[in-house]
Image (cartoon, rainbow, N blue to C red):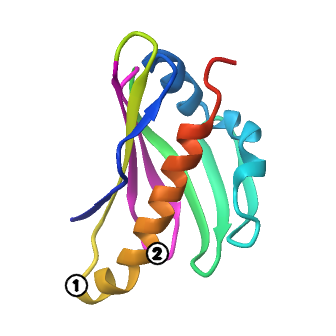
Amino acid sequence: MVKFESSVKQIQAPQRAVYEKLSDLSNLEKVKDRLPEDKVKNLSFDSESVSIEVAPVGQITLKIVEKDPDKCVKFGTTTSPLPFNLWIQIVPAGEEACKIRLTIGMEINPFMKAMVQKPLQEGLERMADVLAAIHYAE
């Protein structure tokens, strides 16, 4: 399995508040306007899954497959040109702050890795930036 990781992002909110917001995907309503319209279309979601059309990749649907309270939310693809898993790890950084890191794991050959590495890494960083910019204290 090949893994891609975002950089670690600092969030000025308690670990529990961040986990509660990220483990219920219906909270995406609050960040829809932060997604780049030229890259992301047809966003739909409920509390356990999210479906999005990403240019030039196509339709991707992720479903929560595991929750580790306050620490991690794991997703798996149900629709994707390349199946993958996504983890959002949350660790405390004091009582009123925490850090997150996103990890994607996928089974791909070295040729495909060379093709997807740069856009996937950039997308992962952009996603981490959006998650770090959410107001979790609401």
Q: Main secondary structure of the magenta part?
A: strand
Number of marks: 2
Going from the N terminus, do you reach mark 1 or mark 2 first? Answer: 1
Q: Quadrant of residue 117?
A: bottom left
**On screen, 6 above or below 25?**
below
Res. 67 visible in picture: no
Q: Nearer the viewer, residue 12 or 100?
A: 12
From this viewpoint, which residue is outermost toward the bottom? Answer: 111
Q: Is residue 18 left or right of residue 37?
A: left
Screen quadrant of the C terminus: top right
Range shown magenta: 70-93
Residue 119 is tagged as 2
Label 1 to label 2: alpha-carbon separation: 15 Å
- Near mark 2 (Cα within 10 A), the count class, few <14, some 14-19 or many ≥20, is few
Q: Quadrant of residue 137?
A: top right
Residue named by callout 1: 110
Say which residue appears at 65% left-offset and 57% top-offset.
Answer: 51
Residue 79 at what x, y percent from top left? 55, 65
**On screen, 126 above or below 136?**
below
Residue 42 at what x, y percent from top left? 77, 63
**On screen, 9 above or below 135?**
below
Task: Say if the magenta span includes residue 90.
Answer: yes
Q: Is residue 81 left or right of residue 6?
A: right
The type of residue carrying mark 1 is Pro
Say which residue appears at 40% left-offset and 9% top-offset.
Answer: 95
Residue 97 at what x, y percent from top left? 44, 20
Say which residue appears at 76% left-offset and 66% top-offset.
Answer: 37
Residue 28 is tagged as none
Q: Secondary structure at mark 1?
A: helix
